[in-house]
Image (cartoon, rainbow, N blue to C red):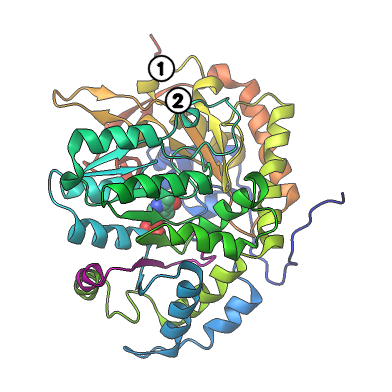
């Protein structure tokens, strides 16, 4: 087989500069050792997130010129609505400015304090939105999903036995709905199988509990199902996506992922009473129901992007880039979560930096080392992001200490990836010098975005 090439060529370029090591050290110190505070021009390769960082196609840019900026009833909304209905089959479609706005509306309208919402793994903003209204957000990832080195095709699956046990324990009155996140971002971008979605739905249906999808990467998940699950080889990604949504009663989505746009989200459902609640909250928080916090041109770009994300050539190329990076890491014995997910490579910071204890945040140590050595911006998904404090105020670490290299869509080429691998290799060889960090300032929610760190120089 020949090389899988980028199914596009470059028409507009954006300058990319590698600043000096001294400048990087100064920039990181100014940023309180938290990469979220860095200026993006100071990052040579920015793998902080794949969210809203992709490149749009000529067709998307052309569609933006068709954007109708009327307050109500624009044709741009109707194209947006039609596209999403075509994919999801849902009756009610609401635009939101981002995925978290859809989650906020869902949490505010459909849950009560003391409720329980199970998910295969909640994304950080999803968890925060539920916890903010006093809901217990439970992660019920399958056992394979907790083993970093174990290779299985669908490590993002819901643990069905644990879900059943949760329903027995809390009772269906306490569970307004359950969720499945495709792909499972928090646990390594791992996919969920159709069978698992089907079985989850069957169990929930028995107890009359609705299923809501966190659909951010539904197209990447559809590609994994096509490649890995029996019975889907000859189905199109659109057909697979439709089947995924057919098991759901509603969905939240960040269009900054598989919408292939730089801003946007949606909230969809079938139930009329839910839609009534969503509509009221949407108007109060986001905007009128035909724009929901977005410009008409944003709706147009998303309508085109959603269909491009379901093109086989695009998904094949995207998965090939992630695989390319993974093979290069294998060759250099750099530890990461196996197999690789759809949108990112998750480095195993615990294995990378075994000398740093979890509460000295090995993920921060590794992320900062990647920046200092090569200007690569990544993000910690470990005890800073997912650690928690118990009632007595004692901090507990996260079971996994990961550093995510998220791959923006249609942005970097093969030489960029080669550079990333060279930097990782250099950091691995000098890892003994990398120190842990302590937090010097932190907010109450989503602390990883804004907390301040300092290096622990006197390791005891
Ligand atoms: C990005 C993301 C969200 C939140 O979407 P935003 O557009 O960033 O608000 C929710 N869930 C998952 C799985 C995500 O990846």
Q: Is mark 2 within 8 Å of ligand 1?
A: no
From the top left corner, tell me how far across and down residue 170 is, in percent.
18, 37
| Residue found at x 29% / y 45% | 127
From the top left corner, tell me how far across and down residue 182 is, in percent.
47, 50
The stretch of residues the image draws in magenta is 257-277
User: Does residue 300 appear to the left or right of 109 in the view shown?
Assistant: right
The residue furthest right is 1
| Crowd around label 1: few <14 · some 14–19 · many ≥20 (10 Å) | few
Asked whether 443 or 303 is in front, the reply is: 303
Asked whether 449 or 121 is in front, the reply is: 121
Observer able to see residue 81: yes
Q: Quadrant of the C terminus?
A: top left
Q: Where is mark 1, residue-wise?
A: 357
Q: Is residue 220 magenta?
A: no
Image-quarter location of ligand 1: bottom left
From the top left corner, tell me how far across and down residue 65 is, in percent.
54, 87
90 shown above or below 427: below
Observer able to see residue 258: no
Q: Where is mark 2, residue-wise?
A: 362
The residue furthest front is 206
Calculate the distance from the C-alpha at mark 1 to the C-alpha at mark 2: 7 Å
User: Does residue 109 appear to the left or right of 314 in the view shown?
Assistant: left
User: Does residue 417 appear to the left or right of 171 in the view shown?
Assistant: right
| Residue found at x 42% / y 22% | 436
Q: Is residue 263 magenta?
A: yes
**Chain-order first, disc 1 or disc 2:** 1
Q: Determine which of the numbered discs, if any, sits on residue 409 in the image.
A: none
50 shown above or below 441: below
Question: Helix or strand or loop: what does disc 2 sit on?
Answer: helix
195 shown above or below 108: above
C-beta proximity under 8 Å, tags 1 and 2: yes
Asked whether 70 or 246 is in front, the reply is: 246
């Amino acid at each position: 087989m020949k090389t899988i090439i980028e199914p596009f060529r470059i028409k507009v370029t954006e300058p990319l500069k590698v600043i000096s090591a001294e400048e990087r050290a100064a920039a990181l110190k100014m940023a309180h050792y938290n990469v979220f505070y860095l200026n993006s021009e100071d990052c040579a390769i920015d793998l902080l997130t794949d969210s809203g960082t992709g490149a749009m196609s000529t067709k998307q840019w052309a569609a933006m010129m068709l954007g109708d900026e009327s307050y109500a009833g624009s044709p741009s909304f109707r194209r947006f609505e039609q596209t999403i209905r075509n994919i999801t089959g849902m009756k009610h479609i609401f635009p939101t400015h981002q995925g978290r706005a859809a989650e906020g509306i869902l949490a505010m309208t459909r849950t009560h304090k003391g409720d329980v919402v199970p998910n295969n793994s909640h994304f950080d903003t999803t968890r925060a939105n539920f916890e903010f209204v006093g809901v217990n957000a439970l992660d019920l990832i399958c056992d394979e999903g907790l083993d970093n080195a174990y290779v299985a095709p669908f490590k993002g699956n819901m643990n069905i036995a644990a879900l059943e046990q949760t329903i027995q324990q809390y009772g269906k009155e306490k569970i307004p709905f359950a969720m499945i996140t495709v792909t499972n971002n928090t646990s390594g971008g791992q996919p969920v199988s159709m069978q698992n979605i089907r079985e989850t739905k069957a169990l929930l249906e028995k107890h009359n509990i609705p299923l809501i999808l966190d659909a951010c990467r539904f197209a990447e998940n559809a590609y994994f199902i096509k490649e890995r699950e029996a019975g889907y080889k000859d189905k199109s990604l659109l057909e697979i996506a439709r089947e995924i949504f057919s098991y759901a009663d509603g969905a939240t989505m960040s269009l900054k992922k598989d919408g292939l746009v730089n801003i946007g989200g949606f909230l969809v459902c079938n139930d009329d009473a839910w839609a009534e609640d969503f509509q009221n909250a949407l108007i109060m928080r986001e905007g009128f129901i035909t724009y929901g916090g977005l410009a008409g041109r944003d709706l147009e770009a998303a309508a085109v992007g959603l269909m491009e994300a379901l093109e086989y050539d695009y998904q094949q190329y995207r998965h090939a880039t992630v695989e390319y990076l993974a093979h290069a890491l294998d060759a250099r014995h750099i530890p990461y979560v196996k197999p690789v997910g759809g949108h990112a490579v998750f480095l195993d910071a615990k294995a990378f930096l075994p000398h740093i204890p979890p509460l000295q945040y090995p993920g921060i140590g590794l992320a900062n080392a990647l920046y200092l050595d090569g200007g690569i911006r990544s993000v910690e998904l470990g005890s800073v992001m997912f650690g928690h404090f118990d009632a007595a105020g004692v901090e507990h670490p996260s079971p996994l200490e990961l550093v995510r290299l998220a791959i923006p869509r249609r942005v970097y080429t093969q030489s960029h990836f080669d550079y990333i691998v060279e930097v990782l290799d250099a950091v691995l060889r000098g890892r003994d010098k990398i120190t842990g960090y302590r937090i010097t300032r932190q907010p109450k929610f989503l602390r990883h975005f804004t907390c301040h760190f300092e290096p622990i120089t006197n390791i005891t």
